[in-house]
Image: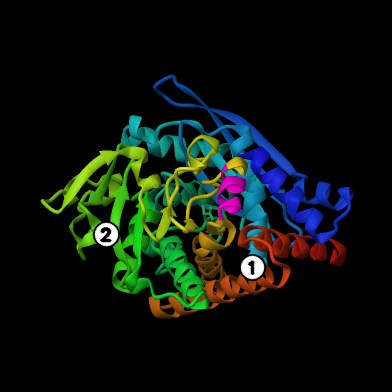
């Protein structure tokens, strides 16, 4: 992922006519914090926080608990965060954190210990005006609540603005949990509108039904009236049988196991199970990638049939995958805009904490929609004007903003 980010940035930089020095500035990472967390059960886990760039505002970005987390991945994700906040016009920088661990292997007590220990190591380097972490893969509001509590105990900061993604009772914002999925739904809805297409006449397949994928699916079904014909989890794909010849669809209303990100509950006589990666090859109109990074790569990009892809995860398509898809004309709505809903509502949460206010869900959703619609239109127009893919358009716009804020400093 780090190489993909680097190469795509270099490509967009060339398009903008940037000097090597300017490209190096965009790739430069400000600080890297790497430490070990030792749990009471004796196990040791590598932990990271990478602070990429704060020229536009405090470092901002999630923390993930996942066995695949390593320094290079966190670096790439931190760069993507700075580009994301710039692409959607937030006054924030970019950072990312993670711990190399499978949280499902931990008891509740161990999970709390891990979360508090992460803050115990990192607290001198983060804070409401310095670096504001948030949820990412496998992190929920309970984990963030433990982290805020630990931060408050150690530093005495009572503002609650040190983290976003808190539960509502602990200073969280209405709409934050659904924000990434909702933002993605708005981005694809706006893109289809601009392209003169009607989502209710289109078939959608969604890879990943964790927090982001599940909220996206529900909202795409209820607000866009999109026809969801396939979803997948970490083990299997569930698809409507013979979906091009009937009007059946999958409804997530029945997905009781959403929190575990599993699709077993949805089985019925209209659907069948295929293997996990079959989702990528289905002849649907829109493929939504809401699982992990680097899932569409050299070996499988050619098999993707959907003409439109929404990158709801961070970095789900690698550089080879991107080149293959672009060569065959696939439209990719890029992650740094498509999944920005989470950080947009994080920003709204932080503003509420700072002002001591609590806004209604309608207010939050309205502001989220304003940001998402504006950013989607902007990359669409820029891409059209310069005849470049949306991904390159989003990167170019974001990079220009990063450089402008550097000059203004
Ligand atoms: N983890 C989310 C992302 O990748 C949200 C980050 C945040 O809210 O700061 O954008």
Mark 1 residue element: loop
Q: Quadrant of residue 247?
A: bottom left
| Along the viewing direction, whichever of 281 and 220 lies nearer the viewer | 281
The part of the chain drawn in magenta is: 321-328
On the question of residue 31 being in view, the answer is: yes
Q: Is residue 248 above or below residue 271?
A: below
Quick one: 389 or 372, which is closer to the camera? 389
Query: Of helix, strand and loop, which mostly describes the magenta segment?
Result: helix
Horizontal and vertical percent position of residue 94 = 66, 53
- Image quarter (top left, top right, bottom left or bottom right) of the C terminus: bottom right
Name the element at disc 2.
Answer: helix
Q: Which of the two discs, 1 and 2, sits closer to the camera?
A: 2
What residue lies at 59% left-to-right and 48% top-to-bottom?
322
Q: Nearer the viewer, residue 26 or 1?
A: 1
Q: Is residue 323 magenta?
A: yes
Q: Residues within 10 Å of mark 1 (few under 14, many from 20)?
A: some
Task: Determine the residue positioned at 62% across, 47% down.
Answer: 323
Distance, label 1 to label 2, CA atoms, is 41 Å
Dot 2 beta carbon under 8 Å from ligand 1: no
Residue furthest toward the left? 269
| Label number found at residue 90 | 1
Residue at left 85%, top 53%?
A: 22
**Residue 372 higher or lower than 164, as above or below:** below
Q: Which residue is mark 2?
A: 244
Q: Position of residue 140 (x, y in %)?
A: 39, 50
Q: Is residue 126 visible?
A: no
Q: Taking 132 as reference, is 249 left or right?
A: left
Residue 93 picture location, percent across and down: 68, 58
Q: Quadrant of the N terminus?
A: top right
């Amino acid at each position: 992922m780090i190489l993909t980010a680097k190469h795509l940035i270099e490509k967009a930089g060339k398009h903008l006519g940037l000097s090597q020095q300017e490209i190096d500035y965009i790739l430069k990472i400000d600080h890297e914090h790497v430490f070990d967390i030792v749990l009471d059960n004796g196990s040791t886990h590598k932990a990271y926080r990478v602070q990429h760039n704060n020229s536009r505002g405090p470092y901002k970005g999630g923390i993930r608990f996942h066995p695949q987390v390593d320094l290079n991945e966190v670096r790439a994700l931190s760069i993507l965060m700075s580009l994301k906040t710039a692409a959607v016009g937030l006054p924030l920088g970019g950072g990312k954190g993670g711990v190399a661990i499978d949280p499902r292997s931990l008891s509740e007590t161990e999970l709390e210990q891990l979360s508090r220990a992460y803050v115990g190591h990192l607290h001198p380097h983060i804070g409401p005006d310095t670096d504001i972490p948030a949820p990412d893969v496998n992190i929920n509001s309970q984990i963030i609540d433990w982290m805020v509590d630990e931060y408050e105990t150690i530093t005495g900061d009572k503002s609650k603005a040190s983290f976003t993604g808190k539960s509502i009772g602990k200073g969280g914002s209405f709409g934050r949990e659904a924000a990434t999925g909702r933002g993605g739904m708005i981005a694809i809805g706006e893109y289809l509108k601009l392209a003169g297409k009607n989502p209710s006449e289109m078939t959608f397949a969604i890879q990943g039904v964790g927090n982001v994928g599940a909220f996206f699916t529900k909202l795409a079904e209820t607000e866009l009236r999109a026809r969801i014909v396939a979803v997948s989890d970490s083990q299997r794909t569930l698809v409507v049988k013979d979906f091009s010849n009937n009007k059946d669809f999958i409804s997530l209303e029945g997905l009781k196991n959403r929190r575990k990100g599993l699709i077993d509950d949805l089985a019925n006589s209209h659907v069948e199970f295929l293997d996990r990666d079959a989702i990528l090859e289905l002849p649907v109109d829109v493929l939504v990638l809401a699982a992990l990074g680097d899932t569409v790569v050299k070996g499988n990009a050619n098999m993707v049939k959907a003409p439109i892809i929404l990158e709801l995860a961070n970095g789900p398509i690698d550089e080879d995958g991107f080149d293959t898809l672009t060569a065959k004309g696939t439209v990719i709505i890029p992650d740094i805009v498509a999944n920005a809903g989470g950080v947009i509502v994080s920003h709204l949460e932080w503003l509420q904490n700072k002002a001591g206010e609590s806004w209604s869900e309608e207010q939050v959703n309205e502001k989220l929609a304003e940001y998402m619609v504006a950013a989607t239109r902007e990359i669409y127009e820029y891409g059209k004007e310069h005849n470049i893919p949306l991904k390159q358009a989003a990167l170019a716009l974001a990079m220009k903003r990063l450089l402008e804020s550097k000059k203004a400093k």
